[in-house]
Image: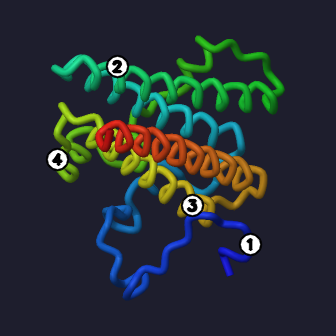
Amino acid sequence: MLAGKGFKKVFNVSGGIKAWEAKTAIGPQELGMDLFSGKEEPLDVLKVAYSLEQGLRDFYLAMEKEAKNETVKSLFAKLAEIEVQHQISIYKAYTGISTVDVGKDEFEKMVETRTLEGGLTTEEYLDIFKPDMSSETEVISLAMSIEAQALDLYQRVSLKVEDPKSRDIINKIADEEKTHMASLGKLLDTLFKEVIK
């Protein structure tokens, strides 16, 4: 069916989803849900989303400082910049629906939480995935895992949030997480092709 719809890379996984052994979202069903009450108005949702992106950007910048390998340092800088772009998108969405003119500095002061996307702390991500910080592929795999956690969180939150407009915003942010994952996947493919050469 998928091939018939034009999908080019379709795989039949023996054993189905129960046989899947690759990375999946981890943690309890409630992980990260405390960031959202379910009563958020659209502007509140955007503030929380912005803070999650900031938390991940801070993480990448901290990892950039710790990395010994210059290529990996550069990769962490690139990942941090991707989060900045996502923050800009969220800020524009905020100013687009706010009835009050809010400057970027003022907006950032309104954003208090500094939690990583997906609801885990830096230490928890590093402890669970134990990436080799000198390996580009492991760094990208870690980034993909974090984005997968974020996507999972937004999908769970969209079921909890009552306001339809807030739910639409969450679903749009979730779609952007899918785009991030696709970009990281392409970057990983590029690295694998370079290794094969």
Q: Residue 59, how many percent across, how many down?
A: 33, 29
Using the image, determine if residue 177 lies above or below residue 13.
Answer: above
Mark-to-mark CA distance, 4 and 2: 20 Å
Q: Amino acid at mark 1?
A: Lys
Residue bearing mark 3:
155
Q: How busy is the neighbourhood of tag 1: few (under 14 within 10 Å), some, or many (20 plus)?
A: few
Left-right relation of 15 to 105 = left
> Is 196 placed above or below 12 here?
above
- Give residue 39's quadrant in the image: bottom right
Disc with the residue nearer the chain's start (4 vs 3): 4
Q: Nearer the viewer, mark 4 or mark 3?
A: 4
**Label ID, residue 5:** 1
* Residue named by callout 4: 130
How many neighbours does mark 4 have within 10 angstroms: few (below 14), some (14-19), or many (20 or more)?
Answer: few
Q: What residue would you read off at disc 2?
A: 74
Binning the other alpha carbons within 10 Å of mark 2 as few (below 14), some (14 to 19) or many (20 upward) gives some
| Image point (72%, 30%), residue name | 94
Question: Label 2 is placed on what type of residue?
Answer: Ser
- The location of residue 179, given as percent across then percent down, is 59, 45
Residue at 60 percent across and 51 percent down: it is 174
Work out how far the residue at label 3 is from the one at label 2, CA to CA, in angstroms: 31 Å
